[in-house]
């Protein structure tokens, strides 16, 4: 487990302890008591990890996958890889590892093992979680299960609404620039904010900067494999713009959660332009060495975008 700052103290350290206690208790006999201790009475689960699979299963009468999916994946173990904390927020990046032995939102047991990423951004106030936001790589999960999105009885696709929350990236950059940076974390935060602005600035990026994961990784791989070349998302959505919801900095890391929106005006992985507005959340982890931006790990809601385009099974064979 990598902490953005292993020497955090005070409230930040307590908030991380709460977040990790909550995560590590899941599936254990201690879970009910831990939830009573750490979940605030007004706890808001703003987004679930399997947002689209759960939405697709609504009102279909399929068996429930169980608390934290442990009826569908009884041997589930979450491997936490990254932890960050700033203010009242804690971010966790973890891998969900498990064997699929029960019905999962309409997908019968396959016996297959899965190992997929999920990211959590939590708000913790006075020692209790007041908000939880989660996003799992649902596309990778379906690919590893060898499954498609189960067809609904009404034949409909449940496309997510366009996200309109967050602060316009250009406005955020202007706001941050209006006050002098007080720390290296402030300067790194500005570098990341500028990278999401309309200018898509790459200032501060090291010459040997490495993309550990691209935002639309599965679309990128599909595009290359099908002979469409490099994924040209900005060409397909030429009016794409970002609105930033969360921007956290601690130690050598900056985490950002933003909504990217645009109009599908050119071919995207063989999908002809539909003229539709699409928009999905994206989460990114940036690592720095001093003022040099060394690494990027980015994770976008690809299944959500494909649902909006009416092609949720495009990447699923």
Image (spheres, helix red, strand yellow):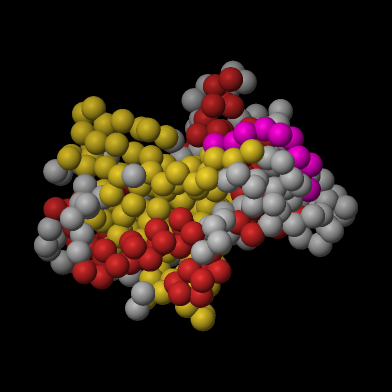
| Any part of residue 260 in sight | no
128 part of magenta stretch: no
Q: Is residue 41 above or below residue 26?
A: below
Task: Considering the whole magenta stretch, tell me its main secondary structure.
Answer: loop
In the picture, measured across the screen, residue 315 lies left or right of residue 214, that is right
Quadrant of the rendered structure where residue 149 is?
Answer: top right
In the picture, measured across the screen, residue 250 lies left or right of residue 227, that is left
Quarter in which the C terminus is drawn: top right
In the picture, measured across the screen, residue 286 lies left or right of residue 264, that is left
Residue pictured at 51% horizontal, 81% vertical: 41
In the picture, measured across the screen, residue 160 lies left or right of residue 136, that is right
Q: Is residue 153 above or below residue 296?
A: below
* Residue 224 position within the rendered picture, expressed as x and y whole percent measured from the top left: 54, 22
* Viewer-proximal residue among 20 and 304: 20
Residue pictured at 76% horizontal, 40% vertical: 109
Residue pictured at 64% horizontal, 52% vertical: 70
* Residue 168 position within the rendered picture, expressed as x and y whole percent measured from the top left: 39, 61
Quarter in which the N terminus is drawn: top left
110 part of magenta stretch: yes
Quadrant of the rendered structure where residue 316 is?
Answer: top right
* Viewer-proximal residue among 249 and 100: 100
Residue furthest to the right in view is: 153
* Viewer-proximal residue among 8 and 309: 8
| Any part of residue 18 in sight | yes
- Count every numbered label the image shows and give the total: 0
Q: Is residue 273 above or below residue 84?
A: above
Residue furthest to the bottom in view is: 41
Residue pictured at 46% horizontal, 62% vertical: 22
Magenta region = 106-115
* Residue 142 position within the rendered picture, expressed as x and y whole percent measured from the top left: 66, 38
């Amino acid at each position: 487990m990598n902490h953005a700052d292993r020497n955090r103290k005070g409230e930040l350290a307590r908030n991380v302890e709460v977040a990790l206690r909550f995560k590590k208790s899941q599936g254990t006999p201690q879970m009910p008591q831990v939830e009573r201790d750490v979940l605030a009475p007004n706890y808001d689960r703003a987004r679930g990890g399997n947002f689209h699979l759960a939405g697709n299963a609504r009102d279909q009468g399929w068996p429930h996958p169980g608390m934290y999916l442990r009826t569908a994946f009884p041997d589930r173990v979450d491997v936490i890889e990254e932890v960050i904390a700033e203010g009242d927020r804690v971010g966790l990046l973890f891998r969900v590892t498990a064997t699929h032995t029960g019905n999962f939102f309409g997908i019968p047991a396959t016996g297959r093992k899965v190992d997929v990423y999920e990211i959590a951004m939590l708000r913790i106030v006075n020692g209790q979680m007041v908000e939880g936001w989660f996003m799992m790589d649902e596309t990778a999960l379906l690919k590893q299960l060898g499954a498609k999105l189960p067809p609904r009885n009404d034949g409909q696709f449940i496309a997510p609404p366009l996200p309109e929350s967050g602060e316009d990236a250009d406005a955020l950059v202007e706001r941050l620039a209006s006050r002098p940076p007080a720390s290296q974390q402030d300067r790194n935060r500005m570098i990341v904010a500028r990278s999401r602005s309309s200018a898509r600035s790459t200032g501060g990026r090291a010459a040997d900067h490495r993309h550990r994961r691209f935002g639309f990784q599965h679309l990128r791989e599909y595009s290359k494999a099908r002979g469409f070349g490099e994924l040209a998302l900005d060409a397909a959505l030429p009016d794409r713009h970002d609105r930033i919801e969360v921007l956290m900095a601690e130690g050598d890391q900056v985490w950002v959660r933003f909504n990217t929106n645009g109009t599908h005006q050119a071919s995207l992985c063989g999908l002809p332009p539909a003229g539709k507005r699409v928009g999905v959340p994206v989460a990114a982890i940036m690592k720095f060495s001093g003022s040099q931006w060394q690494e990027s790990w980015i994770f976008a809601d690809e299944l959500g975008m494909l649902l909006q385009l009416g092609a949720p099974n495009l990447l699923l064979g």
